[in-house]
Amino acid sequence: MRIFDPHIHMTSRTTDDYERMAAAGVRAVVEPAFWLGQPRTSAASFTDYFDSLIGWEPFRAGQFGVRHHATVALNPKEANDPRCRPVLDLLPRYLDKDAVVAVGEIGYDSMTPEEDEAFAAQLALAVAYDLPALVHTPHRDKARGVERTLAVVTESGIDPGRVVVDHLNEVTVKLVRDTGCWLGFSIYPDTKMTPSRMVELLREYGTERMLVNSAADWGRSDPLLTRATGEAMLLAGFSDDDVDQVLWRNPVEFYGQSGRLDLTDLDVAAVDPQTGNSILRGGS
Ligand SMILES: [Zn+2]
């Protein structure tokens, strides 16, 4: 089983995690820029963080045979802090980097006017830099948050096929499935979504445009829940090819739209088992 975790915060994980992930089949990850728990007090802290996401962390991942790419953004929570807003002016410098495959995490936390502004501005950056966008949805008032998210995405003019709306559940999936956006699901030990609930959603909605991530961070989370979801799919009667689509080809296709996904020299099959085409670059 080859696995691409499309949303995981490795900065907050140990080398033991990299070792266990590699043993479980994780060959590639995307690490979105996010809130670090401790509020940052200036834009300069973001500079160091972004540099680490495209420098140190890929190096660390590489030692375990895991390919690491990043997304950068001013996250929704810190969009409310005037000390952090100047980050918006720093982003273009990073959106030019090869290691950056999307703008994210953007979206809503508490749905404030400040978040509205930062969200729209960063969707405009995604359009300007021809990059996909990773959109976080709020944990409180979820359905209203997703509705408002989709309205802002539509208004921005970005191609919905270049947007993943993340942290969905049984209720919010219904709002996103017909919009053309990709559907992201974070599998957590005891909140958000579990492997068995994910399998039910895959049964109901199919495997197209579905992205499964561990969203592992410094909270209670588990970087091996992507693998656990693959195993639950097999037990439920999905084929190896279905698992490969959800856990590998879908994230490759989504982030491949950046034109920057580099999966060369990885220990994975280089051809699509269905079409026989090379899929390493993915997307269009
Ligand atoms: Zn996250």
Image (cartoon, rainbow, N blue to C red):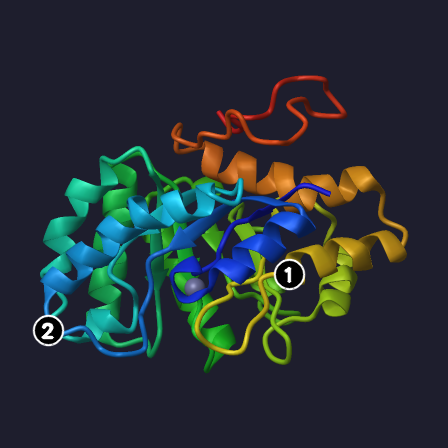
Q: Residue at x 62, y 57 (%)?
A: 20
Label 2 secondary element: loop
Residue 195, how many percent across, how many down? 72, 65
Q: Which mark is residue 82?
A: 2
Name above or below for residue 99 compared with residue 7. above
Amino acid type of the residue that numbered disc 2 sits on in the rendered structure: Pro
- Residue 2 position within the rendered picture, expressed as x and y whole percent measured from the top left: 67, 41
Label 1 Cα crowd, 10 Å radius (few <14 / some 14-19 / many 20+): many
Mark 2 burial class by Cα count in 10 Å: few <14, some 14-19, many 20+: few
Cα–Cα gap, marks 2 and 1: 37 Å
Mark drawn on residue 224: 1
Point out the quarter of the image occupied by ligand 1.
bottom left
179 relative to 157 in the view: left or right: right
**Which of the 4 image quadrants contains residue 190?**
bottom right
Q: Disc 1 marks which amino acid?
A: Leu
Point 47% across, 43% down: residue: 63
